[in-house]
Image: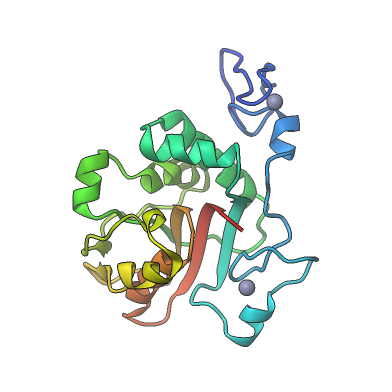
């Protein structure tokens, strides 16, 4: 639970956030009205019309990951917060998104992964941006649940255009074969963490590289997707 010497204001309604709020910059009322992706497939996190475990697609042809969380539909204010975290070096927003992910994960009943892999950026993009927002978002989650972060094993070795600038059909070839393993993984249960998923092709390409060395219990943790 968040504890501060100074009261903070809710980013949405500007009211004082009670010290009991699980999110530093959100009051409980505003937390509850965010565009949560609540009823979703446990494997791919696609929204479902009712509380079913899996979508029809995953029942017939399961995805590579065994569990997925996509917290929100990519709409305001989540889209604004992700933009600030990603392009404006706003570490307050990185921490906010990390706390929202922690808040969701706190309700899970199954065992936690042995390590978290933030989605890597290509070294050129990392130099341009100066930081990897996925690493920043992973920080609070790693601390809260005492899970180590692995920023080394998975590498993005091929520079590709930003997925958001491409048409859907171009996105798959844009990231295909973009990732490789620098070293074998020493754990068997991991979570791949990313800020936004659009087509799911980046996740698929990274998962393929991770699964190359053998079977792995793979989870996907993502903040938002435009559904
Ligand atoms: Zn509020
Ligand atoms: Zn599914």
- Locate residue 182 relative to residue 165 in the image: left or right: left
- Locate residue 222 relative to residue 154 in the image: left or right: right
Single out the residue that lies furthest toward the right: 50
* Vertical relation: 78 (above or below) 71: above
Which residue is rendered at x = 65% and y = 57% of the image?
Answer: 108
Residue sitting nearer the eye, 120 or 216? 120
- The image position of residue 81, as x and y in percent, is 51, 36
Q: What is the count of numbered marks?
A: 0
Query: Which quadrant would residue 165 be assigned to in this image?
Result: bottom left
Which image quarter is the N terminus in?
top right
* Vertical relation: 198 (above or below) 91: below
Single out the residue that lies furthest toward the top: 6
Which quarter of the frame holds ligand 2?
A: bottom right
- Locate residue 67 relative to residue 137 in the image: left or right: right
- The image position of residue 90, as x and y in percent, is 41, 30
Query: Which quadrant would residue 172 be assigned to in this image?
Result: bottom left
Which residue is rendered at x = 66% and y = 83% of the image?
Answer: 59
Which residue is rendered at x = 63% and y = 65% of the image?
Answer: 46
């Amino acid at each position: 639970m968040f504890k501060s010497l100074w009261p903070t204001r809710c980013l949405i309604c500007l009211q004082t956030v009670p010290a009991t709020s699980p999110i530093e910059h959100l009051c409980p009322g505003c937390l509850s009205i965010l565009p949560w992706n609540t009823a979703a497939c446990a494997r791919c996190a696609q929204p479902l019309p009712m509380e079913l475990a899996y979508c029809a697609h995953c029942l017939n042809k399961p995805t590579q990951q065994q569990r997925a969380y996509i917290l929100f539909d990519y709409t305001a204010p989540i889209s604004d917060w992700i933009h600030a975290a990603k392009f404006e070096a706003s570490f307050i927003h990185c921490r906010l998104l990390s706390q929202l992910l922690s808040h969701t994960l706190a309700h899970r009943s199954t065992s936690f992964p042995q390590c978290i892999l933030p989605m890597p950026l290509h070294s050129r993009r990392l130099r341009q941006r100066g930081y990897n927002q996925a690493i920043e978002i992973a920080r609070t989650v790693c601390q809260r649940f005492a899970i180590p972060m692995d920023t080394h094993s998975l590498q993005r070795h091929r520079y590709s255009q930003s997925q958001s600038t491409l048409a859907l059909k171009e996105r798959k070839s844009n990231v295909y074969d973009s990732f490789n393993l620098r070293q074998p993984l020493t754990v068997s249960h991991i979570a791949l963490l990313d800020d936004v998923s659009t087509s799911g092709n980046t996740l698929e390409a990274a998962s393929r590289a991770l699964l190359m060395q053998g079977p792995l219990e793979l989870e996907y943790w993502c903040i938002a997707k435009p559904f």
